[in-house]
Amino acid sequence: MNAAKAFLPLAASLLLSGLLVSTAATAADAPRVVVSIKPIHSLVAAIMQGVGTPDLIVDGAASPHTYAFKPSNARSLQEAQLVFWVGPGMEAFLQKPLASLGANATVVELDDAPGITKLKFREGGAFEPHDDGDEHEGNDDHAHGHDHDHGEFDTHLWLDPHNAKAMVAEITTSLVAADPANALTYEANQKALNDKLDALDTEIAATVAPVKDKPFIVFHDAYQYFERRYGVRVSGSITVSPETIPGAQRVAEIHSKVADLGATCVFAEPQFEPKLVNVVLEGTSAKSGVLDPEAATLPQGPDLYFDLMRGIASSLKTCLSAQG
């Protein structure tokens, strides 16, 4: 009996050691995944739950439009097996590092995912469709937008949950190919995430329904997919591209538009200088709010995408409802 009792702690210890070794082996076997920006990182993190955690390049309150590549980012790319990004139209700063440092990784460009809806880039205070044959005299920030660098489509694709689902499908396919041992986990996570995205889509539509007909101005034209999906009325942007300070003509144009629209809202973004918004608002009855399309103020992780979308819907409803 005493020998049996003495054996029990030893057996338990061996079992625990085995479990720890097994867990460590699983973690070690998880592919090294790197993701460019927070909204995409959130989707990848949700698919990888139970397997591993992807690295994020543009973290904190940084913006991909103005991001300075860091040595720590270089190390992540060098060690990566799989890299997810939207594409050069969104993360232009990543093109050269991916070509050199990420040469041994599988690079997945999500703006090419099957099923993605792409909308043409817009410009001008009233969002006239872009036409390469036009002369845009006086538009100081024309031709400097990040979206002009790669095709003619708006790259804020994730702001429509249907596009998010298309990206999730591509993310899952890529992870399964890179790590077939965990395929069942990735596929189960995909199904759960798609169900959550469908529920979110319904929720957002209900949130913004009472203010769909009220026009508003945004800091830069990042919301076209949200606008088309939910029928809200974006009437113009202060700047075509957040990398470029708008000229006096554009600011005057948007100021006049706000005055012509009557009571409305003008939305700033947390990463960019709010003074321009104050200039546009001056002398009008419009109110100001903040929209965060790239999740600068949100903590990274699998819930971020849902917090981002709910935050945009809530900000729109709050500001536009105050207009009566």
Image (cartoon, helix red, strand yellow):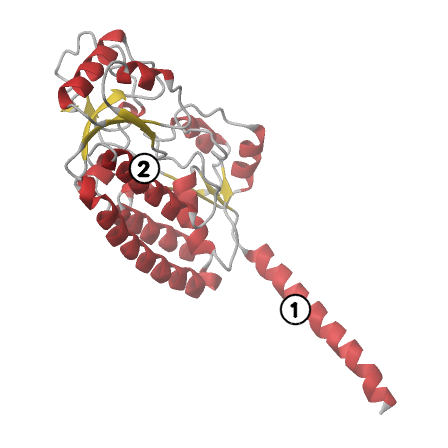
Residue 278: percent from left, percent from top: 33, 17
Displayed quadrant of residue 263: top left
Q: The disc labelled 2 sits on which kind of residue?
A: Ser
Q: Secondary structure at mark 1?
A: helix
Displayed quadrant of residue 150: top left
The residue singled out by tag 1 in the image is: 19
The residue singled out by tag 2 in the image is: 315
Q: Residue at x 43, y 53 (%)?
A: 46
> Of tags 1 and 2, which is closer to the observer?
2
Residue 156: percent from left, percent from top: 30, 35
Which of the labelled discs sits on residue 268, or is there none? none
Residue 266: percent from left, percent from top: 27, 25
Depth check, front residue: 69 or 306: 306
Q: Secondary structure at mark 2?
A: helix
Q: Residue at x 51, y 37 (%)?
A: 77
Q: Residue at x 19, y 43 (%)?
A: 210
Residue 124 seen in this snapshot: no
Q: Residue furthest bottom?
A: 1
- Horizontal side of 318 relative to 228 (left or right) equals right
Depth check, front residue: 312 or 161: 312
Depth check, front residue: 39 or 214: 214
Q: Answer yes or no: do the residues labelled 1 and 2 have beta carbons within 8 Å?
A: no
Depth check, front residue: 83 or 275: 275
The span from disc 1 to disc 2 (Cα, nearest Å) is 47 Å
Q: Residue at x 17, y 7 (%)?
A: 137
For the residue carrying disc 2, how many other residues have a C-alpha within 10 Å: few (<14), some (14-19), or many (20+)?
Answer: some
320 vs 230: above or below: above
